[in-house]
Image (tube, rainbow, N blue to C red):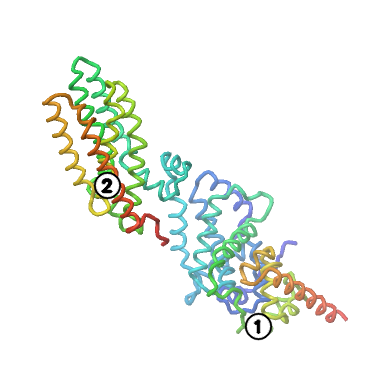
Amino acid sequence: MTTRWHVDEALLVGWVEGRIGPVFAASVEQHVVGCALCRDRVGRAAVSDPGSDLPDFERTWSAIRDAVEVPRPSRTERLLAAGGLSAPDAMLAAGAPALRGAWLSVVALVVLFAAAASLADARAAGVTLFLIVAPLIPVAGVAVAYSVEVDPALEQEAATPYPKLRLVLLRTAAVLVVSLPLVAAAGLFLPTGVSPRWLLPAAGFTAVLLAASTWIDPARPAIAVALGWVITVAVTADRGSPVELLTGSGVIVYLVLLVGGLVALVLRIRHVGVRRRLS
Amino acid sequence: MTVVDTREDAELLRVMGAGDLSAMRVLYDRHAPWLAVRLARRCNDAEVVADVLQDTFVAVWKHSGAFRGDGDVGAWLWGIAVRRLVSRLRRRRDVVVFADLPERGPLGPDVEEQVLLDIEYGELGPAVGRLSPEMRAVLQATVLDGLTTSEAAKLLHIPQNTVKTRLHRAKVRLRQSLAEGRS
Ligand SMILES: [Zn+2]
């Protein structure tokens, strides 16, 4: 058969405009699904229908294009997601400066330098340098984990209903996971008594900063902690060995900071919450 | 205007699999209007129709390779669209589905009678027209749209058993009508 039945124009327009009964609509639909010619006619009728209850086709296309053009998650994101993080958590954690190459390179360089110096004849200077740097690495990590000045993208993220504290905790975890193994490896070259005791001030400072971040941008308290620590280590090194900072009363101070910081943090978590609100 | 070969649609799907968005644009221009009209005849909310249309083509983009070359692209697209509609409406009870349209449109009975002679359902048409709106809705969702009874139940917000009962009754009613018409 060369001639084929096609939907009557009045019926076709009636279907497009929703004016015909279900029986006729059904017959038009059964035909249109398999007839390219009538599909084209529907297209023209649908676009030219002024009082249409149909969606805006150009706007819908833009939405489709946006949806399919969303970039694939980065390798870090996919790795974090495979580790059990939800997709938005993975995206934000991957955005932590600690996971960016530059940050990692700086940490590695500083740590290697300190370790190398401690192996060379300037052993005491190397130990001092390591002691200054190692506990401050997680501190810097927390500071940049949630600082609008460091990460402009946070301005946008802060506008979303994503709890700030959850972001800080997530990114701090990312910082620690990435940085600590490097620092710990470098610490192995140091005389016993330094490693792994440097973890005590590191943990104390981190806990205090995390607690502080529930009130203020952690960048400022981080700078205060860093300055105080650098001066303390320098003064102690001048008087004798900075390793003394890791014994006796020093240990008690770090433990107080750690416990106090953690208690404050837990209380604040209960107060402000870290769960993602449903939007 | 020439009839567009359906094989070209299948070819577009193949090219889309390689990431060619312009191929989907062609497919969208060809199929979005009738899909939208058919969806709009099942759901009275233009926002939902737009969302379902979007869902459909996003799904098509992701699964263009799932199309089996032997079938009809139009039917395949509708299969995706109507299932997207089911999932969009699962939690929306405020949307009227399968609105009961006026039995006689402004077209006049002559045009409709003329057309009825040629449609696939032939003498079934008037019989379907005599069914209650509830039964027609079930018949449309299952027989015409190809949904399973469970999908139809979700779409119409009625228990699956009700779908089965209404479908059974609709078929009995149709058989009676046909028998009466022939005798
Ligand atoms: Zn046709």
Q: Classify A256 as above or below B179.
A: above
Label at residue B91? none
Q: Which amino acid does label 2 sit on?
A: Gly
Q: Residue at (42%, 47%) from the top-left corner?
A: A71
In the picture of the structure, the residue carrying the numbered disc 1 is: B103
**In the image, the residue with mark 2 has its CB under 8 Å from the nearest atom of ligand 1:** no
Q: Quadrant of the C terminus of chain B?
A: bottom right
Specify whether A247 is left or right of A182.
left
Task: Name which quarter of the figure residue B75 lies in.
Answer: bottom right
Please report, as a chain letter, where disc 1 is located.
B
Answer few, some or many: residues within 10 Å of disc 2's Cα (few below 14, many 20 plus, some between 14 and 19).
some
**In the image, the residue with mark 1 has its CB under 8 Å from the nearest atom of ligand 1:** no
Q: Residue at (13%, 34%) from the top-left corner?
A: A231
Task: Name which quarter of the figure residue A234 lies in.
Answer: top left
Tag nearer the camera, 1 or 2? 2
Q: Is residue A79 visible?
A: yes
Q: What residue type is labelled 1?
A: Glu
Task: Name which quarter of the figure residue A99 lies in.
Answer: top left
Residue B48 pos. (x, y %): 51, 68
Query: In the image shown, does A169 or A244 lie closer to the viewer?
Result: A244
Total numbered labels: 2
Hey, which residue is sitting farthest front in the picture?
Answer: A248
Query: In the image shown, does A68 or A264 lie closer to the viewer?
Result: A264
| Mark pair 1, 2: CA separation | 76 Å
Please report, as a chain letter, where disc 2 is located.
A
Tell me the quadrant of ligand 1: bottom right
Label at residue A260? 2
Answer few, some or many: residues within 10 Å of disc 1's Cα (few below 14, many 20 plus, some between 14 and 19).
some
Query: In the image shown, does A37 or A168 lie closer to the viewer?
Result: A168
